[in-house]
Image: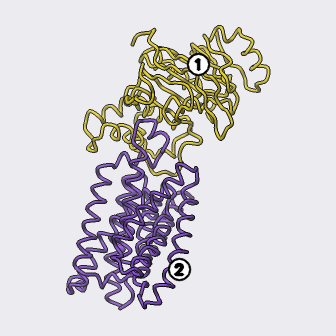
Chain colours: A yellow, B purple
Amino acid sequence: MNKTEELITVKNVFFSYDQKPVLIDINLSIWAGDFLAILGPNGAGKTTLIKIILGLLRVQRGQVMLFNQPIESFKDWHKLGYVPQTATYFDPLFPATVQEVMAMALFSIKKVWIKRKAEKEAMAKFLELVGLKGKEKVPIGQLSTGEQQKVFIARALIHQPKVLILDEPTTGIDAETQRQFYDLLHQLNVEKKITIIIVTHDIGIVNRHITRVACLEGRLIYHGSHDDFCRSKVFKEMVGRDDHVISHQH
Amino acid sequence: MDLLWHYGFAQRAIFAGLAIGISSALLGVFLLLRREAMIGHGLGHIIFGAMAFALSLKLAPLPVALIVAILASLGITKLKTKAGVHSDTAIAIFSSVGMAVGILLVTLVNRYGIDLLSFLFGDILAIDREEMILALILAGGVILFVLFYYYQLLFLTFSYESAKAFGLKVNRLENLLTWLTAVTIVVGMKIVGLLLMTSLLVIPAAAGLQMAGSFLTSCLLAVTIAVTSVVMGLWFALLTNLPASSTIVLLSFIFFLISFIKRRRRFF
């Protein structure tokens, strides 16, 4: 993947719910190799923005380009991996095993319903990558929140996406698991060359692995490198009003 | 058990019962997990109204009921996706309207002396060869649909949003599932009655979901419970001369109770 390749372009995007503007004139470029954090308080439009990028919401004004194609004609959705927010995502009593959660992504897109050996090996490989080897037969509801989130990462990786988008991935996860989680994302970013977009209201995630930051408050109030962000007025203002512990490291 | 094979009417009942039972159990697992357990009841009310309408105008009830059921299921889906109304609310709205129309038309129909009660309670032991074949074709269609779209349906049921983000044609799949449910209810209601139809759609699937540790075992358990309830229920009905619909429903409820107790023992 070309380091300078622009994978996602958001141009003058506007979106409103029932006449209430949520995103106003958003311009954002995401480049190959980025580890981008989209920050902002609750209701700032972060989830709306990623839902637009994922094609879950239709752009009302402006334009979104994915891999140099207008989103309206984009078909290669396997190039984007999506990890939803676990807490609001699924019923913990849903009777699906880890293997079934992986298989639903693998076989529903490939349109094959007989498990082939190669596909089974692929599932095992990605589960091993996220440290869940041996948990294939465990019902997903019986795993911890951190482990469930890792299953969804493994599932998102199964089509070998170029971009991985994570919505509030560390909600309800303890500090140690969060550290392991960001190390895993860093490994994917550096070793597997996967561009990562992480959406959060928690400024504490701005750590050494993040390369770029975008701050939303309806409008895009900051978009630039991590180092510049840590020196910016926006950062100081956000820290000033944020109760979370800051864990950024230089 | 010889009773089941001794008479032609009993053989037809068992084949049709198994066909409707297997189709309903398979669809029921998806519907229950999608919080659409009441869709059978809701569409049943609407279909009841449609059949009353068809009979009052001396039209063939089955095609009219099929068209109305498919339109109603489409309406429920649209109300849910376009107007942001929850599934249960959309089903309740259509169910109430269907019932109101049904009562209105039944009142009119009764003036002509037409009996609609058979659609409500049915008589599985009185079905003819054509109805049995219709049930078998339906079961074949449902089984093929679930086998072919198994993982897509599982993904859609697990998370609509993620399935869409992964590029699945979720609206098309959702419509297919709802239409097939509507067709199953129409055919099932005509053959075994609304009471047995809605019960077969919910109870075996609920029992299967109580006991299973995976989605596949949920489906297999639901089908096994439906098959056992139909066979044992019919046999018991023939042996005791009790209504078959009631014995099948009550037997499936006993399976649900067993699965519920088993689950409680596992967790407490």
Residue on which the image places disc 1: A27
Q: Is A5 rendered above or below residue B66?
A: above
> Which amino acid does the dot numbered 1 rest on?
Asn
Q: Is A192 rendered above or below residue B213?
A: above
Q: Disc 1 sits on a residue from what chain?
A: A
Residue on which the image places disc 2: B103
Q: Disc 2 sits on a residue from what chain?
A: B
Q: Position of residue A98 (x, y in %)?
A: 43, 41
Few, some or many C-alpha atoms within 10 Å of disc 2 (few <14, some 14-19, many ≥20)? some
Res A195 visible: yes
User: What residue do we see at 42% from left, 45% from top?
Assistant: B170
Quarter of the picture holding the C terminus of chain B: bottom right
User: What residue do we see at 44% from left, 80% from top?
Assistant: B120
Say what secondary structure mark 2 lies in: helix
Say what secondary structure mark 1 lies in: strand
Q: How many marks?
A: 2
Q: Position of residue B236 (x, y in %)?
A: 35, 84
Res B248 visible: no
Q: Position of residue B210 (x, y in %)?
A: 47, 60
Q: Is B45 rendered above or below residue A24?
A: below
